[in-house]
Image (cartoon, grey):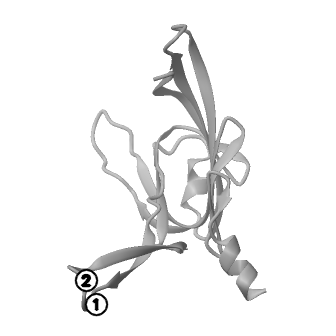
Amino acid sequence: MKQIYNNVVDHRLLDGGTEVEDVTSVELPTISYKASTFDVAGMAGALEVPDMNSIEAMSITISHNNGVNGTLLNVPGKHLVEFRIARQRLSVSSGDLGYEGGKYRVTGMLKSQKEGTVERGNPIGTTNEYSVSRYEREVDGVVVTLIDVVAGIVKINGVDYSSKVRSLLN
């Protein structure tokens, strides 16, 4: 083991380029590939084969305490969200602490808005869920995940899994 990745030290969320304050958490999408099931004579059982070019519907959830610009997250329609993080990293060999930067860029549409609970002594938080059409994850300046559902792009760790299908259709 060379590195131990630890806590997210801080984060920042922008919606359409405007910073939204008092964001408490962001639940990132689950990337799930659609699969076909084969169950034919001669096989010992059914086999599920995922299609790396076909993604199930994705969503993200943003929870916030209605801080400065929090109302921007509640607007129906298209959102361009960028979520930036700084994560602590420990070098096992030297014992030095460092940091890793990450960015998540999402294009989505507001799907639902949970207004929260009014409770004495607690903030009134809102939770927004967005349907995702484009998702990009960058770690220390390198894009490691790019899924653009509308453009038909599925790129993981620099490998474009959808390029073969696109080239066959050109």
Q: Residue furthest front?
A: 42
Q: Amino acid at mark 2?
A: Met
Q: Position of residue 115 (x, y in %)?
A: 39, 57
On residue 40, the disc is 1
The residue under label 2 is 43
Q: Position of residue 58 (x, y in %)?
A: 48, 66
Quarter occupied by residue 72: bottom right
- Residue drawn at (44%, 59%), measured in percent from left and top? 30
**Residue 63 can be seen in this image:** no
- Residue drawn at (57%, 53%), measured in percent from left and top? 71
Q: Residue furthest bottom?
A: 41
Quarter occupied by residue 167: bottom right
Closer to the camera, 59 or 145? 145
Number of numbered discs on residues: 2
Q: Residue furthest right?
A: 170
Q: Are marks 2 and 1 in contact (CB under 8 Å)?
A: yes
Quadrant where the image shows the N terminus: top left
* Left-right relation of 14 to 71: right
Quadrant where the image shows the C terminus: bottom right
Give the vertical position of 79 relative to 85 (above or below). below
Q: Regarding mark 2 in the picture, which secondary structure is present there?
A: loop
Q: Regarding mark 1 in the picture, which secondary structure is present there?
A: loop
Between marks 2 and 1, how big is the CA–CA gap? 6 Å
**Residue 67 can be seen in this image:** yes
Q: Position of residue 103 (x, y in %)?
A: 64, 43
Q: Amino acid at mark 1?
A: Val
Q: Position of residue 8 (x, y in %)?
A: 49, 29
* Left-right relation of 101 to 10: right
On residue 72, the disc is none
- Residue drawn at (62%, 51%), measured in percent from left and top? 157
Closer to the camera, 150 or 67? 150
- Residue drawn at (48%, 63%), measured in percent from left and top? 59
